[in-house]
Every structure is written in C-alpha cells, then in structure tokens.
Amino acid sequence: MTAREVNFDGLPGLTHHYAGLSFGNEASTRHRHRVSNPQLAAKQGLKKMKALADAGYPQAVIPPQERPNVPLLRQLGFSGSDEQVVARAAQQDPDLLSAVSSASAMWVANAATVCPSADSLDGLVHLTVANLQDKFHRASEAPTTEALLQAIFPDRTRFAIHPALPASAWFGDEGAANHNRLGGEYGAPGVQLFVYGRRRGSEEAPRRYPARQTLEASQGGGAPQSGQSSPTDLRSPASGGDRHGGVP
C-alpha cells in the first residue's frame, strides 16, 4: 500500500488574543490578558510550516474559522446588523464576546481523530470531528471543521468524514490531542492509543483539573473504525495541568 503522511497546521486568525479561556491549560491561564499580535502569530505559524516543508515534509495549512462567531451571538439573543450584534455583546457581556472571538481553531490537534487506511476495517481513512464540548469557546468549531474536512478530503472512495459525537459530558472528545499511533513502515498496520481522563460511572476523577476526554468518546469516535474492540487503557491522571502548547 502506498501511504503518505501530511502535517496539518492551523493559521491564527485576526481575532487571536490571550483570554485565558482554557482552565486546565496552564499556559492559557498564565498568559491571560497579555497583548497579542495576530499578524505576527500568523507569520510565525507560516514560518514553522515552511521549515517543515523545506525539510521535505508534506505540509498543509488550515485556514482560520470566521470570528467573531456572529451566528452564535444571534442564537444567544443578540439582534441587529453584524456590527450591532458585536457592539451589543461587547457592551453587555465582554467575556462572551471574547469567547466567540477566540482563534483557538488554530490548534488543529483538537480538530479530529484520524484512523489511517492501514488500520481501518474498510480500508478508508476515517476522520472523526471532535466535539470539544468541555470548553464553550471551542464547542462551536465542530460544524465548520466538518465542512472543512469534507472539502479537503472529497473522495469518498478513500476518505470517510464522521460528524462530532453528541455534545455531552458523556462523550467529551478532544480529538487527536488524546490519540497516538505506534507503527513501523508507512502503509503497514499499527497500534492506536487512546488516552482518556474519565469514564462514566467511575469514581476516579482528576484531582486538580477537569478531564476533557472520556473513555466513551474514544470508544465511539476512533476505536471502532480501527478495528480495535476497545481503546488501549492509558488513563491520564489529568491533574498536573494541560501541557499542550495552545494558549487560546
């Protein structure tokens, strides 16, 4: 089987700012209210992508999602023109406006869980969109992410795009950030690892920060396509803080 690995990076959007929205992500909390520079952030991201491309790695760029998320503000009761909706949100609830303006979709490790064709039951590449239901500022990303993946991978003879799992605490899913794969040669079957922090009905719980990934999400979103009867049991203590590089 001919296989290729492509690296996907997200591009920071124009509303990139440090709002400290991700409790449990120590970098997010530590950098709260610092002055941001969206243009510089985008240039830094592109520079990193070019470095990988120059080193011979196939590199793809994921565009930012439209922010502020005006349709979401309308859903929450704000009315008027787009400009009026944003202005009223800024006046009435600036924290809400900050959340719906987050450029956190740049962190594409949380976009979806990917099962390569070498591991899947039907020989397709499966991508399951993450619901990111634990954080309000990220939970609205899933529909756009799904549409984007459908556009990038339109060939249904090779790719299957699955919508996000139900947005419920039972199925908290953070995508590839809690998933890894051990393998040898490209195109050869490997072993997928799904890391979770909590499961339904268990009294085990993180001591310091809430767990965002559940066992049920890993069972429902990734393991079935890979042919694994259940995720490899690698429970994360999730108590020492999220070390992810994202600072939404």
Image (spheres, grey):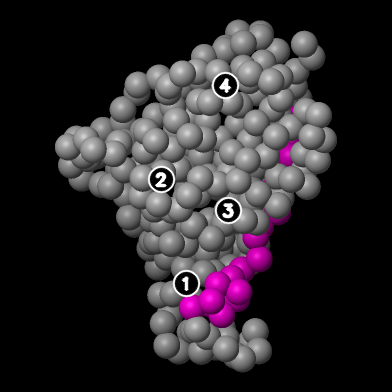
Number of numbered discs overlaid on the protein picture: 4
Q: Nearer the viewer, residue 211 or 121?
A: 121
> Can you tell which of label 1 and label 3 is closer to the viewer?
3
- Residue 117 among magenta residues: no
Earlier in the chain: of badge 1 and badge 2, it is 1
Residue 27 in view (yes/no)? no
Above or below, 19 relative to 80: above
How many angstroms separate mark 2 from mark 3 (CA)? Answer: 13 Å
Identified at 51% across, 89% down, the residue is 88
Q: Residue 54: where, in percent of width, then height? A: 76, 31
The span picked out in magenta is: 58-76
Q: Pick whichever of labels 2 and 3 is earlier in the sequence.
A: 3
Residue drawn where x is 20% and y is 45% of the image: 208
Q: Quick one: 218 or 13, which is closer to the camera?
A: 218
Q: Amino acid at mark 4?
A: Ser
Query: Label 1 vs label 3: CA separation?
Result: 18 Å
Residue 226, disc: 4
Query: Which residue corresponds to mark 1?
Result: 98
Q: Are marks 2 and 4 in contact (CB under 8 Å)?
A: no
In the drawing, what numbered circle is on residue 172? 2
Element under label 2?
loop
Q: Nearer the viewer, mark 3 or mark 4?
A: 4
Q: Amino acid at mark 1?
A: Ser
Mark 3: amino acid:
Ala
Place of residue 30 in the rendered image (x, y in percent of width and height, measured from the top left): 34, 56
Q: Please, what secondary structure does the residue beneath circle 1 have? A: helix
